[in-house]
Image (tube, rainbow, N blue to C red):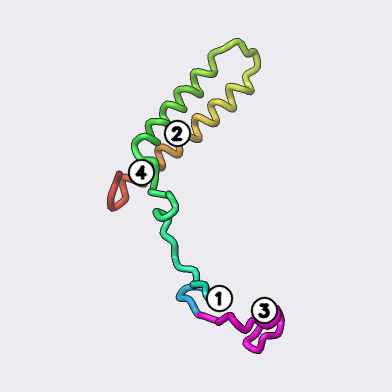
Amino acid sequence: MSDATGRGQGHQTSARVIEQPAREEAIVRAGETPITHERPEDWGWHGEAGKAGRIAGYVMIVFLLVMMVGNHRGRVEDLWLIGFALTILVSLIWDARRRKNAWRSR
């Protein structure tokens, strides 16, 4: 790291050292603004999928279990399909429990 005398990264006479709350000390070039906190909503994330995501989870479980019916002879595929279906089911149960105990359920 360079210190205030300019040793280390070279001299940057047009830069200034600023302190940002809850961040490390930063060097900002002249004419630039320091990084501000960006909310996830600002760049497109608006929360969870909600009811449509839960319905899609149940549809995927049914789809995975229906794929067990077929002309394959080995049962290794069935174990994978059951495993993926159980993983989705456990995550849906966890989500329902989380929403039930949350202050605001969606």
Q: Position of residue 22 (x, y in %)?
A: 47, 73
Secondary structure found at label 2? helix
**Pointer 3 residue:** 1
Q: Position of residue 60 (x, y in %)?
A: 46, 27
The amino acid marked with disc number 1 is Val
Main SS, magenta region, reads loop
Q: Is residue 26 visible?
A: no
Q: Is residue 21 above or below residue 67?
A: below
Other residues around mark 3 within 10 Å, as few (<14) / some (14–19) / many (≥20): few
Give the residue displayed 58% in from the left and 80% down from the top.
15
Q: From mark 3 to mark 1, how far is it between C-alphas?
A: 15 Å
Q: Please name the residue that numbered disc 2 is placed on.
A: 89
Query: How far apart, in angstroms, are the residues tagged by discs 1 and 4?
Result: 46 Å
Callout 4–callout 3 Cβ contact below 8 Å: no
Whichever of labels 2 and 1 marks the residue nearer the N terminus, that label is 1
Q: Is residue 6 left or right of residue 60?
A: right
The residue carrying mark 4 is 97
Residue nearest the viewer, comparing 8 with 10: 10
Examine the rendered structure and indicate whether residue 10 appears above or below residue 98.
Answer: below
The earlier-in-sequence mark between 2 and 4 is: 2
Residue type beneath disc 4: Arg
- In which quadrant will I find the N terminus? bottom right
Name the front one of labels 3 and 2: 3
Which comes before the other along the chain, label 3 or label 1?
3
The magenta span reads 1-18
